[in-house]
Image (cartoon, helix red, strand yellow):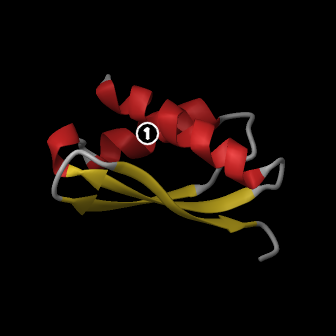
């Protein structure tokens, strides 16, 4: 499943930016050339984030033209 690989890439960026802080929400911009299926990406991210600072975080995906994959913002617990 392609979306699991994307979920892993997103999680890697999230963990670096969160620096150990609990994450509630993740917003990413994903280019349409990735051919992402929203529910499958949600499921893939949920699976790879188990046991991490992003476990249970909501993934907001903004589809944009092109092939970008950008971590746009995080909402941290308590903020």
Please indicate whether residue 30 sits to the left or right of residue 74 in the image.
left
Q: Quadrant of residue 65?
A: bottom left
In this rendering, does residue 56 appear at all?
yes
Q: On the image, numbered disc 1 is attached to which residue?
A: 43
Q: In the rendered view, would you say 65 is above or below 16? A: below
Q: Quadrant of the C terminus?
A: bottom right
Q: Residues within 10 Å of mark 1 (few under 14, many from 20)?
A: some
SS for callout 1 = helix
**In the picture, residue 21 is in which quadrant?**
bottom right
Q: Residue furthest top?
A: 1
Viewer-side residue, 24 vs 21 = 21
Name the residue located 70 percent from the left edge and 44 percent from the top edge: 16
Above-or-below relation of 74 to 21: below
From the top left corner, tell me how far across and down residue 40 is, in percent: 33, 39
What residue appears at the point 78 percent right and 67 percent down from the top-left corner? 77
Q: Nearer the viewer, residue 58 or 21?
A: 21
| Count of numbered badges drawn on the protein | 1
Residue sitting at x 40%, y 34%: 6
């Amino acid at each position: 499943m392609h979306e699991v690989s994307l979920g892993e890439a997103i999680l890697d960026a999230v963990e670096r930016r969160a620096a150990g802080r609990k994450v509630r929400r993740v917003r990413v911009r994903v280019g349409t050339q990735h051919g992402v299926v929203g529910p499958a990406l949600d499921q893939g991210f949920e699976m790879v984030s188990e046991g991490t600072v992003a476990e249970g975080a909501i993934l907001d995906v903004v589809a944009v033209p092109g092939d970008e994959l950008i971590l746009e913002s995080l909402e941290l617990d308590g903020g």
